Image (cartoon, grey):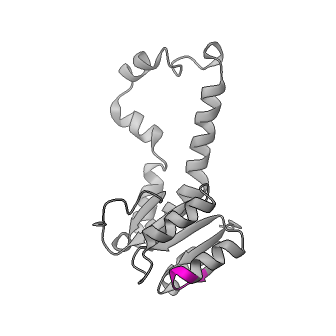
């Protein structure tokens, strides 16, 4: 999968992120927050993979600084465990526990770069489309009747960022987009 996307990876051991590079991402790496912020300011990147526990500057502080400068750049926080201080995630777009594995990180990076922006674009287009031009059953006026006739499972799968087949491939390590 050739992505041509550049990721800034701020991680104590960037070698652990090699699956991202193997799947077509160009990696720019830093092993501490100060170095990561310098790289962020000196070159364009499409997204950031940021380890929470970095030493003096934790990932939450770095994420907040990045969002002040370029709020549109997605940040994926990578952490040893999901118990983080209050407010630690206010500047991140996604959270991945290291125990989820590298394929889950790969899927999350793909999501923040490709799926999430497409969902925002579709929502913006829907909001700009006059009600009389919307597809039947998809308008705000008919939303209740459409939801009443749709089983909850089908609705969840339709709105899910990935199909069940892709989720299975993520879990078993054979992810392909």
Q: Position of residue 15 (x, y in %)?
A: 52, 86
Image quadrant containing the N terminus: bottom right
- The image quadrant that residue 66 belongs to is bottom right
Image quadrant containing the C terminus: bottom right
Who's the residue at 56% across and 74% down the image?
20
Who's the residue at 72% across and 73% down the image?
43
Q: Which one is in front, 20 or 141? A: 141
Query: Magenta residues, as a range?
Result: 29-34
- Location of residue 60 with respect to 164 vertically, above or below: below
Does residue 103 appear in this view? no
Q: Position of residue 91 (x, y in %)?
A: 47, 59
- The image quadrant that residue 23 belongs to is bottom right
**Disc count in the image?**
0
Residue 33 on the magenta segment:
yes
On the rendered structure, is 9 left or right of 133?
left
- The image quadrant that residue 151 belongs to is top left
- Location of residue 55 with respect to 25 vertically, above or below: below
Q: Position of residue 6 (x, y in %)?
A: 67, 70
Residue 20 on the magenta segment:
no
Q: Residue furthest left?
A: 83
Who's the residue at 59% across and 76% down the image?
37
On the rendered structure, is 113 left or right of 154?
right
Q: Which one is in front, 117 or 39? A: 39
Does residue 153 appear in this view? yes
On the rendered structure, is 174 left or right of 71?
left
Q: Position of residue 116 (x, y in %)?
A: 55, 49
- Location of residue 45 with respect to 153 vertically, above or below: below
Who's the residue at 53% across and 56% down the image?
111
């Amino acid at each position: 999968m050739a992505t041509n996307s550049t990721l800034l990876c701020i991680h104590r051991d960037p070698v652990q992120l090699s699956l991202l590079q193997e799947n077509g991402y160009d990696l720019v790496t830093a092993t501490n927050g100060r170095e990561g912020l310098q790289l962020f300011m000196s070159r364009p990147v499409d997204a950031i993979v940021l380890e929470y526990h970095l030493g003096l500057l934790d990932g939450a502080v770095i994420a907040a600084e990045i969002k002040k400068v370029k709020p549109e750049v997605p940040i994926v926080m990578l952490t040893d465990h999901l118990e983080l201080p209050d407010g630690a995630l206010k500047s991140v777009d996604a959270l991945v526990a290291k125990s989820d594995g590298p394929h889950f990180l790969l899927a999350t990076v793909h999501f923040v770069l490709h799926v999430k922006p497409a969902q925002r674009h579709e929502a913006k287009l829907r909001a700009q489309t006059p009600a009389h031009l919307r597809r039947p059953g998809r308008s705000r006026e008919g939303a209740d009747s459409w939801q009443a006739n749709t089983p909850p499972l089908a609705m969840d799968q339709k709105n899910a960022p990935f199909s069940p087949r892709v989720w299975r491939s993520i879990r078993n390590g054979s992810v392909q987009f």
